[in-house]
Image: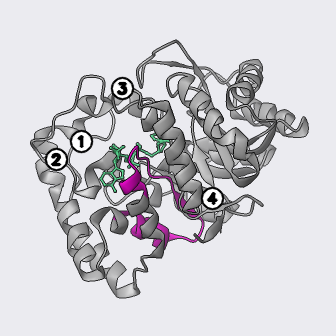
Amino acid sequence: MQKRKLGNSDLEVSALGLGCMGMSFSYGAPQDDNEMIALMHKAVDLGINFFDTAEVYGPWINEELVGKALSPIRDKVVIATKFGFNCVPNGAPGTQTLNSKPEHIKQVAEASLKRLNIDAIDLFYQHRVDPDVPIEEVAGAVKDLIAAGKVRHFGMSEAGAQTIRRAHAVQPVAALQSEYSLWWRKPELEIIPLLEELGIGLVAYSPLGKGFLTGAMSTDTTFASTDFRSKLPRFTPEAMAANQAFVDLLATIAKQKNATTAQIALAWLLAQKPWIVPIPGTTKLHRLEENVGAASVDLTADDLKQIETAAASIKPEGDRYPEAIEKMTGL
Ligand SMILES: NC(=O)c1ccc[n+]([C@@H]2O[C@H](COP(=O)([O-])OP(=O)(O)OC[C@H]3O[C@@H](n4cnc5c(N)ncnc54)[C@H](OP(=O)(O)O)[C@@H]3O)[C@@H](O)[C@H]2O)c1
C-alpha cells in the first residue's frame, strides 16, 4: 500500500490505517483477543502499518490488546494512542470526564507505554480539549515527553482552529484526528484550510460513518444498548432512512468503478488531500481486505465532480453526537 506523510512531519504511514476501538469498545461486547490479534497481523501483511487506539477504549483493554498484537512486530508499525480523560473501569463512551493536566498526561504516557509494551508512543493525541487546562500547558507536557524520548509526535483530536494554532506554536502538531466523511464535512469549513496552512496531517476517524456509509445497515438495523450507536441521533430509523441517500450515491459510483460502497467512501476521503489518512475500523477479516482495496480505487476528477454535485443536494439527518458529547469538540 502507498504511504502518506502526515503534514510537514516526518511521520509516514500507510494511506489507510486500522482503527482498533471497535475491537474492545463502543460497538458492543469486546471481541475475542486471539481473533483480533490475527486481524491486526493480517492488516500488516496487507500493507497497513498505522494502528489507532486510546487509553479510554475499554478503558485500558484496547491498548493492552494492541500491545499484545503489535509489540512483537514493533519495527513494522506506527502506534497512535490518546490521553485526556479520567478513565474509570468499564466507563461507557461519553461518560468519562476530561483531564489534560500536565502531570496527568505524563502519568498516562507511562501507563500507556506499559500497556502497549513499547518504549515510545509514535503519535500521542490529546483526545479532547480540556477547557480547564491552557492548551500551551498540554503542548508543553507533550514537548517534555518528546524530549524524554517517550513520545515521537504530538496529535490533537476534534480541536478547534484557534486551539490547534496555539498548540502548534508550542509543539508542532503532526496530525489532527477528527471525524470526516461524506456525511460529516464540517472540517472543510475552517479546519482543513488551517491544517494545510500549518502543515498538519488529518487522520479521518469514522470514515465509514460508523458503518452506515458501507450500505450494510438499513432502517431495520437495531443496536444493542451496549452499542454507542443506539444513543446517536444519526442512527434513529428516521435519520437512517433520510441518510440512505448518501449510501445510494456511493453505491452508484461503486457500480461505475467496479468497487464496493465502503471502498468509494474511503477512496473519496483519500482523494480530498494527499495528507489525509482514513482509519476505518473493522473486526472482520473480509471487511479488512475490502477496505484495503479502497487504496487502489482511483476516483477521477469527473467521478469526484459527480459525487460533489449529488452530495450537495443531500442534507445529513440527525446530529452525529448527543449535545453533551458534541460540546466536548471544538467545532
Ligand atoms: N478521536 C476520536 O474521538 C475517535 C472517535 C471515534 C473513532 N475513532 C477511531 O477511528 C476508528 C474508526 O472509526 P469507527 O470505528 O468509529 O467508524 P468506521 O471506521 O467509520 O466504521 C466502523 C464500523 O463499520 C463496520 N465496517 C467496517 N468496514 C466495513 C465494510 N467494509 N462493510 C460493512 N461494514 C464495515 C464495522 O463493523 P465490523 O467490525 O462488524 O466490520 C464497524 O461497526 C476507531 O476504531 C477509532 O480508532 C476516534
Residue 245 is left or right of residue 142, and the answer is left
As helix, strand or loop, the secondary structure at mark 1 comes to helix
For image coordinates 32% across by 30% down, the residue present is 228
**Would you say the residues marked 4 and 3 are in contact, meaning their CB atoms lie under 8 Å apart?**
no
Please name the residue that numbered disc 2 is placed on.
240
Real-space Cα separation, disc 1 to disc 2, in angstroms? 7 Å
Real-space Cα separation, disc 1 to disc 3, in angstroms? 21 Å
Q: Position of residue 131 (x, y in %)?
A: 59, 26
Magenta region, residue range: 265-288
Please name the residue that numbered disc 1 is placed on.
234
In this picture, is 99 found above or below 186? above
Real-space Cα separation, disc 2 to disc 4, in angstroms? 31 Å
Real-space Cα separation, disc 2 to disc 3, in angstroms? 23 Å
Residue 281 is left or right of residue 130, and the answer is left
For image coordinates 27% across by 40% down, the residue present is 319
Real-space Cα separation, disc 1 to disc 4, in angstroms? 27 Å
Which tag, 2 or 4, sits closer to the chain's start?
A: 4
**Would you say the residues marked 1 and 2 are in contact, meaning their CB atoms lie under 8 Å apart?**
yes
